[in-house]
Amino acid sequence: MPEMRFVVEWPSGEQQVCYSPSLVVKDHIEVGESYDIDDFVSRCRKALDIASERVLKKYGFPCSLARAEAARIASAAARFRGQRGVKVRVVRFVE
């Protein structure tokens, strides 16, 4: 299962490197696109849940790193909730 990383830029300008145990993230977010915070968190959570399920099917246990990454993304996003018009941008995929 090919793992990957993806770089996002938060409304503050800070960039974060995120992890996925699967390329499935590419089906849910696109490089160069900007997403509303809640939409981005939802897309990442869905993609990382699917990735974790793929690990479960292959190895017999879910991917704790995928779950931790989803929580880390949600935590980073929480700083911007309630702010109108803020977006997170997908900078690049790293394979």
Image: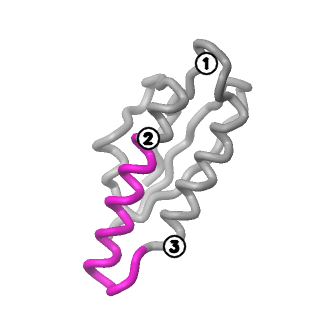
* Residue toward you, 79 or 65: 79
- Name which of mark 1 and mark 2 comes first in the sequence: 2
Q: Which residue is located at x 29 percent, y 70 percent?
A: 54
Name the amino acid type tagged 3: Ser
Q: Please identify the residue farthest to the bottom as the structure is shown.
A: 60
x, y percentage for residue 5? 50, 53
Q: Is residue 45 above or below residue 15?
A: below
> Residue 60: within the magenta?
yes
Name the amino acid type tagged 2: Ser
Disc 3/disc 2 C-alpha distance (Å): 18 Å
Left or right relative to 30: residue 92: right
Which corner quadrant holds the C terminus? Answer: bottom left
**Residue occupied by mark 1:** 86
Q: How many marks?
A: 3
**Residue occupied by mark 2:** 42
**How many other residues sit within 10 Å of disc 2, few (<14), some (14-19) or many (≥20)?**
some
What SS does tag 3 mark? helix
What SS does tag 2 mark? helix
Residue 79: quadrant of the picture = top right
**Residue occupied by mark 3:** 64
Q: Which residue is located at x 50 percent, y 40 percent?
A: 41
Name the amino acid type tagged 1: Val
* Residue range highlighted in magenta: 43-62
**How many other residues sit within 10 Å of disc 3, few (<14), some (14-19) or many (≥20)?**
few
x, y percentage for residue 18? 56, 51
